[in-house]
Image: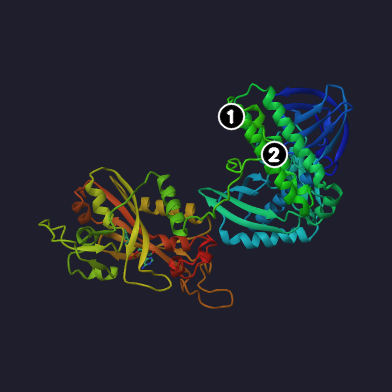
């Protein structure tokens, strides 16, 4: 079992200890020490790097991992290193300190999130490039600023970060959250920030929160039932700057290391039996000595980095060309390129590319995906029907014959049929569908019973104001089976409201009239802008709902005439149907705070990228 020094002192940079074992595996040596200051990758924090020096050799630690109770140091080796050797370990402090700050920042952000959204359940942390914390649940994107503010308050308060060993019972006594998988019969390491409740932690931590420096919440990414909160810190932290001057490396020394890496690689190519593919991965891949070195370029003073960067590329090319020669032995052995003779007619395929800016789905598309998933979980299947459809499906089959006044409600765009309509009386006149209810009879006509459909599509009406747009989306649910009742309809609404809006929001059924359902209801939800009060802070009236409730859609038990029009016997089958607006539903999600539906289709990217 390796003694883990970093658990009790995250600031110890050096250690004298003994080698327990040293074995060569592939290109690297695996070294086990009696005790270690090197942090092994885990808990979302990357591993340390550094050196292990003996009388007869020096190991460059490239990666560290835990294997059971042993810490394995993966190294390249110059000279000798064997069991029982006395060694001096030195960690790459710049790297450690940066990793430690990112890790502590993760805990600070977690504390902020706990305060702002206590119901979220933490799943994991990723405290490296593109750092994030993942939770079960969802979090509105506009909480970004509150979380950032709260995190930076913790940073500004210079709170101590204290780690200690306790029993599980002690942790449970002091904290409302202790994950179930924690061992009961071993001491647990916990971290507390100031007086905040402790949480289990095995990583390295800064001493006080201000060492982390300013934290930025870069994104909140909701995907299904999981949300990731991305954060970043400044590369040069408040204290790191002074440490860098102690540990910085002059350009010639760094270039020396690069040349050494080139020689090691060429030596490996000459002696290794590995295939060209394996060698390329070993010598130029993400775990190679060269890649590890390039990651440490931060140690070189900024003014010298360009010069060092040129040498990095030359070394890469030299290794590349040697690899290519090895693959094609017919080429002349005198052509081995060295630094400064790199070919210019090739390009380095291992260079990282430039990422194009990534967009994301529109908030309405995100809502459609979420709604679909929620209904799929209870056995509904998403279907699609035409968005320019026959009057028959949009009105007549729904108990609204030509000239029926109920049609006025839908403010419909009628369109010319391209060509001459045929003789079919149901296919005479076309409309831009004003609602998704045109899918009801179309679904029934398929003849597959029972029916559990969810039809999501665009709808068109001659309307525009804060809660209406001329193009919008509806999702239409239809459930037809034997003995379906209003209780089923209410159950489905309660399930959907809980899954989509979360607990705490209320829905109500308001008696209404639709020609195609009997009885009929409108479904309202408490407004997310004014919290169901109808009044905003400051006493003004909520301009979106005006009353505390916002209508999401209509619903009811399918009218017998509609079942008949779909070829279903109303004496045997019954069903319920509902049609809700997707935009209104998305706007009512807690935290969206959208009080004008038209903003969704203004195509202002500055607005849209918030969601
Ligand atoms: C209907 O469209 C019915 N077809 C709903 C229905 C289906 C009732 C099945 C019974 C059984 P309504 O016209 O109320 O009902 O529209 C339903 C919802 O669509 C509205 O509550 C609203 O959320 C949304 N909606 C309607 N017009 C617009 C619009 N112009 N812009 C944005 N959303 C709209």
Q: Answer left or right for 214 relative to 355.
A: right
Point out the image quarter for the N terminus. Answer: top right
Q: Is mark 2 within 8 Å of ligand 1?
A: no
Q: Is mark 1 within 8 Å of ligand 1?
A: no
Reading the image, the residue beneath label 1 is 277
Nearer-the-camera pick, 334 or 389:
334
- Residue 64: in sight, yes or no? no
In this view, 576 is above or below 528: above
Q: Position of residue 491 (x, y in %)?
A: 41, 51
Graded by Cα atoms within 10 Å as few (under 14), some (14 to 19) or many (20 or more), the crowding at tag 1 reads few
Mark 2 or mark 1, earlier in chain = 1
Q: Position of residue 432 (x, y in %)?
A: 27, 63
**Which quarter of the rendered image does ligand 1 occupy?**
bottom left
In this view, 226 is above or below 157: above
Nearer-the-camera pick, 221 or 372:
221
Residue at image x 57%, y 55%? Answer: 139
Q: How is the image coloured?
A: rainbow
Residue at image x 38%, y 69%? Answer: 469
Reading the image, the residue beneath label 2 is 315
Q: Quadrant of residue 126?
A: top right
């Amino acid at each position: 079992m390796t003694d883990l020094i970093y658990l009790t002192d995250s600031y110890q940079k050096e250690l004298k200890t003994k080698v327990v074992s040293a074995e060569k595996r592939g290109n690297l040596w695996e070294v086990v020490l009696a005790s270690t200051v090197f942090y092994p990758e885990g808990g979302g924090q990357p591993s340390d790097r550094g050196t292990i020096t003996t009388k007869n050799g020096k190991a460059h630690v490239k990666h560290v991992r835990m294997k059971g109770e042993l810490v394995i140091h993966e190294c390249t080796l110059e000279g000798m290193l064997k069991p029982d050797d006395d060694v001096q370990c030195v960690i790459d402090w710049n790297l450690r300190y940066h990793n430690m700050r990112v890790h502590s920042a993760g805990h600070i952000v977690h504390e902020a999130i706990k305060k702002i959204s206590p119901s979220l359940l933490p799943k994991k942390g990723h405290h490296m490039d593109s750092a994030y914390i993942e939770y079960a649940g969802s979090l509105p994107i506009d909480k970004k600023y509150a979380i950032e503010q709260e995190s930076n308050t913790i940073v500004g308060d210079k709170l101590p970060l204290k780690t200690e060993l306790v029993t599980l019972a002690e942790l449970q006594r002091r904290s409302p959250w202790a994950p179930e998988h924690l061992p009961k019969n071993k001491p647990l390491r916990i971290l507390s920030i100031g007086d905040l409740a402790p949480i289990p932690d095995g990583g390295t931590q800064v001493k006080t929160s201000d060492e982390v420096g300013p934290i930025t919440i870069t994104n909140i990414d909701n995907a299904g039932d999981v949300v990731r909160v991305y954060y970043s810190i400044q590369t040069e932290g408040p204290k790191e700057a002074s440490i860098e001057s102690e540990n910085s490396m002059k350009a010639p020394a760094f270039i020396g290391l690069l040349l050494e890496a080139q020689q090691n690689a060429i030596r490996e190519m000459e002696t290794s039996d590995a295939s060209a593919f394996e060698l390329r991965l070993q010598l130029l891949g993400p775990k190679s000595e060269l890649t590890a070195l390039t990651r440490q370029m931060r140690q070189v003073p900024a003014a010298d980095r360009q010069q060092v960067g040129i040498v990095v590329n030359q070394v890469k090319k030299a290794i590349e060309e040697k690899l290519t020669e090895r693959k094609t032995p017919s080429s002349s052995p005198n052509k081995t390129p060295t630094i400064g003779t790199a070919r210019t007619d090739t390009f380095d395929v291992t260079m990282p590319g430039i990422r194009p800016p990534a967009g994301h789905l529109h908030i309405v598309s995100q809502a459609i995906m979420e709604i679909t998933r929620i209904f799929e979980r209870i056995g509904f299947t998403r279907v699609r029907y035409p968005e320019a459809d026959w009057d028959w499906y949009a009105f007549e089959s729904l108990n609204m014959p030509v000239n029926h006044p109920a049609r006025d409600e839908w403010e419909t765009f009628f369109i010319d049929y391209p060509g001459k309509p045929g003789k079919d009386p149901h296919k005479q006149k076309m409309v831009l569908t004003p609602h998704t209810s045109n899918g009801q009879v179309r679904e029934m006509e398929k003849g597959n019973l029972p029916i559990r459909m969810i039809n999501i599509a665009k709808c068109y009406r001659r309307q525009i104001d804060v809660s209406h747009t001329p193009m919008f989306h509806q999702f239409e649910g239809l459930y037809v089976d034997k003995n379906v009742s209003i209780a089923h309809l209410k159950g489905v609404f309660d399930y959907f409201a809980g899954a989509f809006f979360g607990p705490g929001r209320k829905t109500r059924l308001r008696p209404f009239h639709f020609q195609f359902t009997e009885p009929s209801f409108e479904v309202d939800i408490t407004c997310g802008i004014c919290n169901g009060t109808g009044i905003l802070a400051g006493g003004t009236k909520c301009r979106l709902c005006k009353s505390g409730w916002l209508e999401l859609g209509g619903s009811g038990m399918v009218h017998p005439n509609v079942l008949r029009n779909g070829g279903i016997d109303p004496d045997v089958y019954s069903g319920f149907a509902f049609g809700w607006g997707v935009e209104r539903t998305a706007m009512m999600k807690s935290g969206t705070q959208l009080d004008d539906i038209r903003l969704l289709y203004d195509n202002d990217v500055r607005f849209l990228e918030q969601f």
